[in-house]
Image: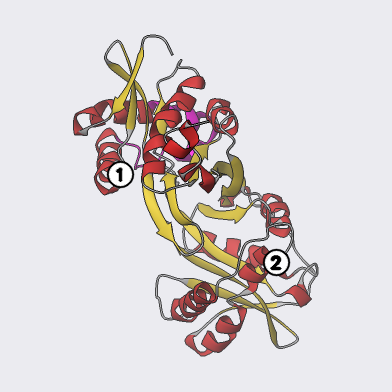
């Protein structure tokens, strides 16, 4: 792009980055008023960006027009059992000045992605805001595909299902730890099936099971258990929503929810949602946040029916790992 320069951003760029991000969020909040939250302050945003630059294992890239920062992109290196080494652009990790073209994001990615490959990261993901189609357009044109949806439910607008299912909903107690342990693999099993095809690792299942049983000991976690004919049929697990520019004030997070296969399509999920919405409203919450896998057919159908509005997508791209050797810098390739 003519007259643009791309170089590593430094701590001196944080005030300009914060101003650009604040502008992006002001535009986002025109469609999602709950994003005009108490976290959206220049000082708070600056601290979040400072932490991002400090904790990241790869430098951020800035776009400068006549020596003025007009956009940036920052990714951090994450290592997990499932994805291996992955470069992650968080919600606050990419922003451009109002009036700049979507193409600028593509050029920023072209610069940053080279650094990520040097770190061994062939999987790249980005949490993409949805109000301004510019961001979704740019990442889509970089061959990123939608993986996860982040949604928000306004409890003042919630329309109960009033399900007639014969289901008893009650708060789970520590005595239900064995029951929760048995249900801990519900989501993993569902994601392992078509069309999600997500691998199931035994060590991950063990971690999830332990987390489910421990959740009943956490005073900040609320677990609702659905029982049908005296047997566990499903659950909702609510926890504190971490404050961020992406989280509404007075919000609680629906961390995980599931219904046993044999009890699906008979109103268990609807009964849990009605009970959860009522309880959270009585506790003084205004919003519920959650996220779901786009290829999970049940989730991607059910949560929007509950009233969750998509706020952002997590999009991902996987570069062929053969590129590590099959590139023109390799002498054995140069001879051809």
Callout 2: 10 Å neighbours few (<14), some, many (20+)?
many
Label the magenta part by its dominant secondary structure.
Answer: helix
Instruction: Give the mark nearer the N terminus: 1 vs 2.
Output: 1
Name the secondary structure under disc 1.
Answer: helix
Task: Give residue 106's position: percent from left, percent from top.
Answer: 49, 26
Name the secondary structure under disc 2.
Answer: helix
Residue displayed at 46% across by 53% down: 251
Q: Is residue 29 visible?
A: no
**In the displayed structure, does residue 167 sit left or right of residue 223?**
right
**In the displayed structure, does residue 191 sit left or right of residue 204?**
right
Q: Which mark is residue 269?
A: 2
Q: Is residue 120 magenta?
A: no
Residue denoted by label 1: 52
Residue displayed at 20% across by 34% down: 11
Residue 68, quarter of picture: top left
**In the displayed structure, does residue 161 sit left or right of residue 118?**
right
In this view, the residue in front, 304 or 277, is 304
> Which quadrant, please, contains the N terminus?
top left
Task: Give residue 89's position: percent from left, percent from top.
Answer: 43, 42
Q: Is residue 194 above or below residue 143?
A: below
Residue displayed at 26% across by 14% down: 67
In this view, the residue in front, 292 or 289, is 292
Tag 1–tag 2 contact (CB < 8 Å): no
Magenta extent: 23-41
Q: Is residue 282 above or below residue 262?
A: above
The colour scheme used here is secondary structure
Nearest-to-viewer mark from 1 and 2: 1
């Amino acid at each position: 792009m003519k007259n643009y320069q791309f170089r590593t951003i430094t701590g001196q760029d944080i005030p300009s980055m914060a101003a650009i991000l604040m502008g992006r969020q002001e535009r986002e909040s025109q469609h999602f008023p709950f994003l005009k939250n108490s976290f959206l302050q220049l000082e708070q945003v600056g601290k979040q960006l400072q932490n991002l630059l400090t904790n990241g294992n790869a430098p951020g890239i800035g776009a400068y027009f006549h020596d003025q920062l007009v956009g940036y992109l920052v990714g951090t290196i994450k290592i997990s059992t499932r994805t291996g080494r992955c470069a992650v652009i968080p919600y606050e990790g990419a922003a451009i000045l109002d009036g700049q073209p979507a193409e600028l994001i593509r050029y920023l990615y072209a610069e940053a992605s080279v650094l990520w490959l040097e770190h061994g990261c062939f999987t790249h993901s980005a949490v993409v805001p949805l109000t301004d189609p510019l961001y979704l357009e740019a990442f889509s044109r970089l061959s990123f595909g939608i993986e996860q949806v982040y949604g928000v439910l306004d409890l003042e607008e919630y329309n109960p299902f009033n399900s007639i299912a014969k289901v008893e909903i009650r708060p789970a107690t520590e005595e239900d730890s064995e029951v929760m342990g048995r249900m801990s693999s519900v989501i993993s099993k569902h994601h392992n099936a078509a069309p999600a095809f997500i691998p199931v690792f035994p060590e991950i299942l063990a971690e999830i099971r332990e987390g489910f049983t421990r959740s009943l000991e956490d005073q900040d976690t609320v677990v609702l258990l659905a029982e049908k004919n005296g047997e566990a049929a499903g659950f909702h697990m609510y926890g504190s929503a971490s404050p961020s520019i992406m989280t509404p004030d007075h919000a609680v997070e629906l961390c995980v929810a599931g219904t046993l296969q044999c009890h699906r399509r008979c109103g268990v999920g609807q009964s849990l949602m009605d009970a959860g919405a009522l309880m959270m409203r009585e506790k003084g919450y205004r919003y519920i946040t959650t996220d779901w896998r786009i290829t999970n057919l049940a989730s991607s159908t059910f949560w929007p029916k509950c009233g969750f509005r998509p706020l952002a997508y997590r999009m991902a791209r996987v570069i062929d790992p053969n590129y590590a050797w099959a590139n023109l810098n390799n002498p054995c390739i140069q001879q051809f």
